[in-house]
């Protein structure tokens, strides 16, 4: 009742009544019947009854679908002339469309169109609309008088038996009365055992009742009590708002990462310059290797050039000719420029080797390896982020904000994932050794 929807019309809804009556006559003649029977005369199980929940085993025992509305909905019976007009209109529809020829949804749609004022060239809908308007007038003659009677009595009175945690829901319930200019009123009756009263001050009120020897069934009205309830509702709403806000902030972290990874994936799917993208991955990998083994604060004699060159060859085996002596007397930036040039040469050699097997195979390999690494590592990253979200809450005991910790560690994990994607693509692509198909003789 508290939800949004159709207004409660005082005296009754003549439009709804007329539509139900048209449906009651129209659907059995025009709608295709549904076959709801699953079994016909199923046998008894070893002389015992069928299992519980499967009926009595007879076809006649099944519930037959009907479109007849409850007689209590209608304030009066239709006049014989109007009822005959309705039967003639339905008979005309059966002649035009055919007996039981319309799917149920389509038949319902025809009734809805006939109950409205939209222009139509269908003679069946036009005839049904004429009958519908006459029926609605007959029902309105009763509903209008009942409407006036209800208005004189004060309109709709809504009674609430408890207060919701949210004031918005209570206001929606109150808003069912006094619609469309009609009068109305609302009133709430609460018990001291109501959840809000019990949690927020119900014991104090019960103590006051005992102190003043108030009888158990005596009603109490107090503005202070009403304000106390509204304050309790406000506290609960604030708590839920903070909870939703925190959930949104956690989700926003993943949304930012998702947008970044999806944009990278879309760039690959659209195939925009994949060669340059892979070369860029390789150059970034070379920069990371140089930064890992070269410390500018130390003298060049202490740089581990052997490990640096070994790591470069581990990723790109085509750089076997590169020796530590080639990098001597170079600064870190000069090493990066030198390795960038060597990477481009090695990539051209690798592309020539693969293209000899099949033309265009290098572009396919680039797309495959990038998409494969993005999909695999992104799935693993999602699982790691879920685990982080579950564990980061415990850091609140260490006077740390779990959300800030989640953002910082999540960002670091995302950067590590992007680095792993680049490195794996470079490693796998240079290790890729396609085999040509044997030619049939």
Image (spheres, rainbow, N blue to C red):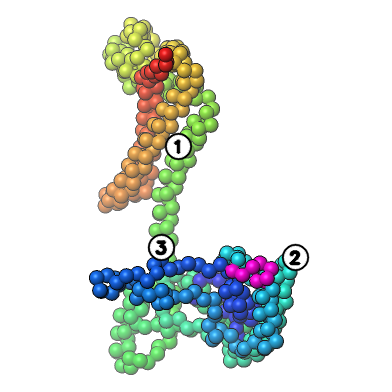
Q: Residue 263's spot in the image, x, y percent? A: 50, 36
Q: Nearer the viewer, residue 433 or 335?
A: 433
Q: Residue 251's spot in the image, x, y percent? A: 42, 49
Q: Is residue 217 above or below residue 124?
A: below
Query: What is the C-alpha distance between the residues marked 1 and 3?
Result: 32 Å
Over which residues does the magenta segment extend?
A: 93-100
| Visible residue check, residue 16 | no
Q: Quadrant of residue 12?
A: bottom right
Q: Residue 230's spot in the image, x, y percent? A: 44, 74
Dominant SS type (magenta): helix
Q: Nearer the viewer, residue 381 or 388?
A: 381
Residue under numbered circle 3 = 240
Q: Nearer the viewer, residue 272 or 353?
A: 353
Secondary structure under tag 1 reads helix
Residue at x 28%, y 48% (from the top left corner): 391
Which quadrant of the rendered structure holds the C terminus? top left
């Amino acid at each position: 009742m508290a939800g949004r929807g159709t207004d409660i019309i005082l005296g009754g809804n003549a439009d709804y009544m007329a539509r139900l009556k048209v449906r009651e006559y129209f659907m059995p003649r025009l709608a295709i019947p549904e076959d709801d029977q699953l079994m016909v005369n199923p046998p008894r199980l070893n002389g015992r009854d069928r299992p519980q929940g499967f009926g009595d085993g007879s076809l006649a025992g099944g519930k037959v679908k009907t479109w007849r509305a409850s007689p209590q909905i209608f304030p009066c019976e239709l006049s014989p002339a109007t009822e005959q007009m309705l039967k003639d209109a339905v008979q005309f529809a059966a002649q035009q469309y055919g007996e039981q020829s319309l799917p149920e949804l389509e038949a319902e749609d025809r009734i809805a169109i006939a109950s409205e004022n939209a222009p139509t060239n269908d003679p069946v809908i036009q005839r049904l609309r004429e009958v519908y308007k006459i029926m609605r007038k007959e029902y309105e003659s009763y509903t209008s008088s009942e409407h006036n009677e209800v208005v004189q009595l004060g309109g709709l009175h809504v009674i609430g038996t408890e207060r919701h945690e949210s004031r918005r829901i209570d206001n929606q319930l109150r808003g069912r009365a006094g619609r469309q200019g009609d009068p109305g009123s609302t009133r709430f009756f609460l018990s001291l055992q109501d959840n809000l009263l019990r949690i927020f001050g119900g014991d104090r009120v019960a103590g006051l009742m005992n102190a003043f020897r108030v009888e158990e069934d005596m009603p109490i009205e107090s503005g202070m009590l009403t304000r106390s309830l509204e304050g309790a509702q406000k506290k609960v709403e604030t708590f839920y708002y903070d909870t939703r806000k925190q959930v949104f902030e956690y989700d926003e972290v993943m949304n930012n990462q998702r947008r970044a990874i999806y944009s990278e994936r879309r760039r690959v799917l659209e195939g925009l310059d994949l060669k340059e993208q892979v070369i860029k991955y390789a150059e970034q990998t070379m920069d990371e290797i140089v930064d890992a083994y070269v410390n500018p604060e130390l003298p060049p004699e202490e740089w581990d050039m052997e490990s640096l060159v070994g790591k470069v060859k581990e990723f790109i085996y085509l750089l076997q000719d590169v020796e530590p002596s080639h990098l001597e007397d170079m600064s870190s930036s000069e090493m990066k420029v030198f390795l960038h040039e060597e990477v481009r040469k090695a990539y051209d050699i690798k592309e020539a080797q693969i293209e000899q097997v099949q033309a265009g195979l290098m572009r396919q390999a680039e797309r495959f390896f990038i998409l494969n690494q993005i999909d695999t590592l992104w799935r693993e990253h999602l699982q790691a982020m879920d685990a982080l979200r579950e564990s980061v809450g415990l850091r609140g005991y260490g006077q740390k904000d779990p959300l800030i910790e989640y953002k910082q560690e999540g960002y670091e994990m995302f950067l590590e994932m992007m680095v792993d994607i680049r490195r794996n693509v470079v490693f796998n692509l240079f290790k890729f050794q396609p085999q040509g198909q044997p030619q049939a003789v």
